[in-house]
Image (cartoon, rainbow, N blue to C red):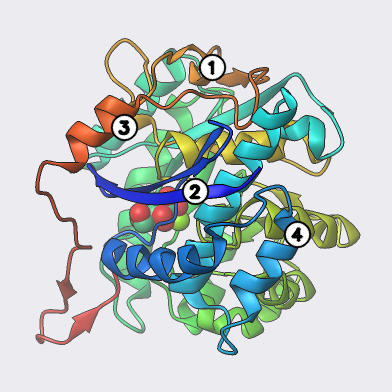
């Protein structure tokens, strides 16, 4: 089997899909994306495609090495995300060529369904609590909130007041459901040390990105100062970067399968995490291909906690977008059942993808500023 064609599609809301075609008619799909920087990843996929076209798609481990290392300069979000999407497509082809789901190639299933969570949003604390309560009523057993907005370096009193305003009624409204908190890297290290013990009182499922990923090396001070399980990883791109976070004592690793080198590298991250008694909760605010890739890992990796779900992209009837048959990604009682179809276990609606890619759209992250006019972390 040979790869004959590699094509990319920018599609709404903010995704990039890659289609890898072979001479035997087997087609694989992947999702190489850095949100808001899709064009940069797309150009990198084109460079990697120069090498891949003409090659045997089943030599995934070798292709991964060449794609990640042969450029001399390695890593980072753009290259690692381009590799990630192509790696997903190669695994999709490998599964389809053999007629089995990817997790069968990775060791077989260890569970029948994967627990999923999603984020609750709203303009006011009451709106967030309402949305979270609705999600739990819909069957979710865990929800995530971002309890702090724009923050300065030492904004403790204001931050703590507004967090309590949100979390006190929310925790009561959720009943037995779990509450995860995403701090989005907005806290300075000194402020995180004060805030985490307070958040721990709510018994969060995990507290995500308390500080920016560039301070991963300091995470050890935070994990030592709180009983709250610390999660991080959506902005880490390799098993080597995860090693620093694992040594710092995180409890939950959140690789994004569209950033951290795809299925291949995430299996290595999962293996290393298991040596630290750390569980995986892959990051996924992305599309159906990224989600299916995460789930394939979830069905075979023992140290797996929960999967993030881009629920806001599901339609009213509970269908994930861009699929000919949305059933495999349907949510039932807060879980997704084991995907049994070949490859990634989903069928991409190619006509819908081509139609969507034809419509101009562009997404950029919001730009936040402090009251004094200086840049603020989003
Ligand atoms: O954990 C999450 O899902 C968030 O941190 C998102 O990844 C971020 O807002 C970019 O979309
Ligand atoms: Mg996050």
Label 4 and label 2: CA atoms lie apart by 19 Å
Residue 158 horizontal/vertical position (percent):
29, 67
Q: Residues within 10 Å of mark 3 (few under 14, many from 20)?
A: some
Which residue position is annotated with label 3? Answer: 312
Element assignment for label 2 = strand
Is 221 on the left-hand or right-hand side of 74? right
Question: N-terminal of the two: label 4 or label 1?
Answer: 4
| Tag 1 residue | 328
Q: CA distance from mark 2 to mark 1?
A: 28 Å
Q: Position of residue 278 (x, y in %)?
A: 79, 55
Q: Is residue 94 left or right of residue 12?
A: right
Marks 4 and 2, the one that precedes in the sequence: 2
Figure quadrant of the C terminus: bottom left
- Residue 188 position, x and y percent, is 44, 80
Q: Residue at x 35, y 36 (%)?
A: 120
Residue behind mark 2? 4
The answer to whether residue 201 shows anywhere in this view is: no
Asked which quadrant contains residue 184, the reply is: bottom left
Q: Residues within 10 Å of mark 2 (few under 14, many from 20)?
A: some
N-terminal label among 1 and 3: 3
Q: Secondary structure at mark 4?
A: helix
Whether the residues at callouts 2 and 1 have beta carbons within 8 Å, the answer is no
On the image, numbered disc 4 is attached to which residue?
61
Mark 2 or mark 1, earlier in chain: 2
């Amino acid at each position: 089997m040979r790869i004959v064609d590699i094509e990319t599609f920018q599609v709404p809301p903010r995704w990039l899909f890659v289609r890898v075609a072979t001479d035997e008619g087997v087609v694989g799909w992947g999702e190489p994306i850095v949100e808001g920087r899709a064009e940069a990843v797309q150009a990198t996929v084109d460079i990697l495609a120069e090498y891949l076209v003409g090659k045997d798609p089943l030599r995934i481990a070798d292709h991964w090495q060449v794609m990640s290392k042969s450029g001399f300069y390695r890593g980072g979000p753009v290259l690692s995300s381009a590799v990630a999407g192509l790696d997903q497509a190669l695994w999709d082809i490998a599964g389809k060529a053999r007629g089995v789901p990817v997790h069968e190639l990775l060791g077989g299933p260890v569970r029948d369904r994967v627990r999923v969570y999603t984020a609750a949003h709203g303009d006011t604390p009451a709106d967030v609590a309402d949305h979270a309560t609705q999600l739990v009523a819909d069957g979710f057993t865990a929800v995530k909130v971002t309890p702090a907005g724009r923050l300065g370096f030492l904004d403790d009193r204001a931050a703590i007041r507004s967090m309590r305003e949100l979390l006190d009624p929310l925790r009561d409204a959720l009943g037995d459901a779990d509450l995860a908190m995403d701090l989005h890297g907005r806290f300075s290290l000194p402020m995180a040390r004060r805030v985490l013990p307070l958040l721990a009182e709510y018994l969060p499922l995990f507290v995500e990105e308390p500080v920016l990923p560039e301070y991963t090396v300091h995470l050890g001070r935070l994990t030592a100062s709180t009983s709250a399980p610390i999660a991080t990883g959506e902005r880490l791109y390799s098993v080597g970067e995860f090693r620093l976070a694992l040594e710092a004592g995180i409890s939950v690793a959140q690789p994004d399968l569209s950033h951290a080198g795809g299925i291949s590298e995430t299996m290595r991250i999962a293996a290393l995490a298991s040596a630290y008694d750390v569980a995986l909760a892959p990051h996924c605010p992305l599309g159906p291909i990224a989600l299916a890739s995460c789930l394939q890992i979830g069905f075979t990796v023992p140290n797996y906690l929960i999967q993030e779900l881009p629920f806001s992209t599901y339609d009213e009837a509970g269908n994930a977008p861009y699929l000919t048959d949305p059933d495999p990604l349907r949510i039932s009682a807060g879980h997704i059942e084991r995907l049994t179809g070949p490859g990634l276990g989903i069928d991409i609606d190619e006509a819908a993808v081509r139609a969507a890619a034809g419509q101009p759209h562009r997404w950029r992250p919001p730009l936040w500023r402090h009251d004094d006019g200086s840049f603020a972390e989003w």
